[in-house]
Amino acid sequence: MSKLFRIFEKLAGERRGRVRHVEILIATVAALIALLTVGWISRSVAGDQAGLYLMASMGASAVLIFAVPGTQMARPWAFCCGHFVSAFVGVSCSLLIGDLVLAAALAVSISIFLMSYLRCLHPPGGAAAMIPIVSGESVTAMGYSFLLIPVGANVLVMLLFSLAYFRWMAQREKRFMAQRSK
């Protein structure tokens, strides 16, 4: 069975780097703490249902930031700008367009366009664009203040946790390399 799996990996172009178990555990705990904090902020500001939508967007970001931090889409610029640009577009579409399907489709499409040109493509931004549209009146009533709290607060929390995580990983790697060179 493992031979078949390796053949599939080759055909699919899958390359697995060596990841230590402790790194996986630390990434998991960092994501858990960050998402619990973001969830609390989102729920207290936007209500239960809208808070869950906001958490979904940040949850997708957590996968990128903590599980595949080396990708361009996980970089701080992409993460921060991708969420803010997309949330701005989503709020604008929710305020200007009455049809929910049209508003959601335009919000995501325009967000892709802007994120691409601003070089801040972050796939969870697509969710950030839809949240103001699908969350209902509690978020729509917030208008553009939605960008500061909860989006800005959530981005700040995730950014701080990711920076602490990256710093810890860099120190760990430095110690690991120093130990190997002895």
Image: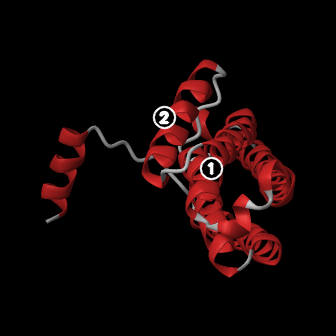
> Type of residue at label 2?
Ser
Give the left or right position of residue 77, taking residue 134 as reference: right
Q: Residue furthest front?
A: 98
Left or right of residue 68, residue 182 in this image: right
Tag 1 or tag 2, which sits nearer the N-term?
A: 1
Q: Where in the figure is residue 25, as x and y percent of width and height?
A: 63, 70
Q: Which scheme is used to colour this image of the protein?
A: secondary structure
The one nearer the camera, 47 or 127, is: 47
Which residue is identified by label 1? Answer: 94
> Does 99 appear above or below 51?
above
Residue at the image point whose x is 60% and y is 63% from the top: 59
Quarter of the figure with residue 96? top right
- Residue 10 percent location from the top left of the image: 22, 41
Q: In the image, which disc is placed on residue 109?
A: 2
**Which of the 4 quarters of the picture holds residue 38?**
bottom right
Tell me where residue 4 sits by quadrant. bottom left
Q: Assign a secondary structure to mark 1.
A: helix
Tell me the crowding category of disc 1: few under 14, some 14 to 19, or many 20 or more residues within 10 angstroms, Cα based.
many
Q: Is residue 79 visible?
A: yes
